[in-house]
Image (cartoon, rainbow, N blue to C red):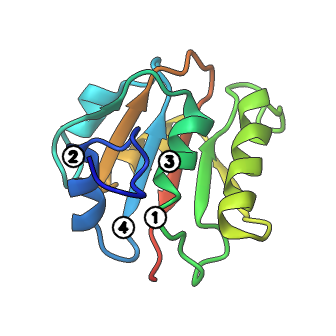
Amino acid sequence: MLKTIDRRLTADLLHALMQMGHGDDLVICDINHPAVTIASETTYGRLLDMAGCDIPQAAEAILTLFPLDSFVPEPVWRMQVVGNPDAQMPVFGRMQSVLDKAEGKPVAMAALERFDFYAAAKRAFCIIRTSDPGPYGCFILRKGVV
């Protein structure tokens, strides 16, 4: 055990976060996301699990170490609701609160259509699957600099 590192962050997850550079993307997803399939196409090449965490809990732990990119208009993207792109799911607001608190300011979040989200996720550095039952608990976070 190490001091000040959130216990929800596993050694494998810390290793992946350390390997990432600024501009790399990280996906945090719910249990319904095709995470294993998509993770095989990411830079990291395999899935990382945060079992026992929902989306906001996982993001809260990750954001204790992970700076969001301040050089892009939207450092976070979420998946749109299929058939209703303007719909707001409860997880969107919960995630927004975690992001804003972690950064100490409002964080802009953009929305991507489902298949555009999947394509972007395949280009990500890694995918972290939570135990969140969803739906639409799929987010991409772009890493910034310290």
Please report whichever mark, 3 or 2, sits nearer to the chain's N-terminal start. Answer: 2
Residue 70 as seen in the image, left or right of residue 52:
right
Q: Which residue is mark 2?
A: 11
The secondary structure type at the circle numbered 4 is: loop
Circle 2: residue type: Ala
Estimate the x, y position of residue 140 in percent, counting from the top left: 50, 51
- Density class for disc 3 (Cα within 10 Å; few <14, some 14-19, many ≥20) is some
Please report whichever mark, 4 or 2, sits nearer to the chain's N-terminal start. Answer: 2
Using the image, tell me which numbered label, if any, was put on residue 80.
Answer: none
Circle 3: residue type: Ala
Q: Which residue is mark 1?
A: 66
Residue positioned 28% across, 67% down in the render: 20
Residue positioned 79% across, 28% down in the render: 90
Estimate the x, y position of residue 101 in percent, counting from the top left: 73, 59
**Gap between marks 1 and 4 measured at Cα:** 11 Å
Using the image, tell me which numbered label, if any, was put on residue 24.
Answer: 4
Please report whichever mark, 1 or 4, sits nearer to the chain's N-terminal start. Answer: 4
Asked which quadrant contains residue 48, the reply is: top left
**Gap between marks 3 and 2 measured at Cα:** 13 Å
Could you tell me if the residues under marks 3 and 4 are in contact, i.e. CB atoms within 8 Å? Answer: no
Q: Which residue is mark 3?
A: 61
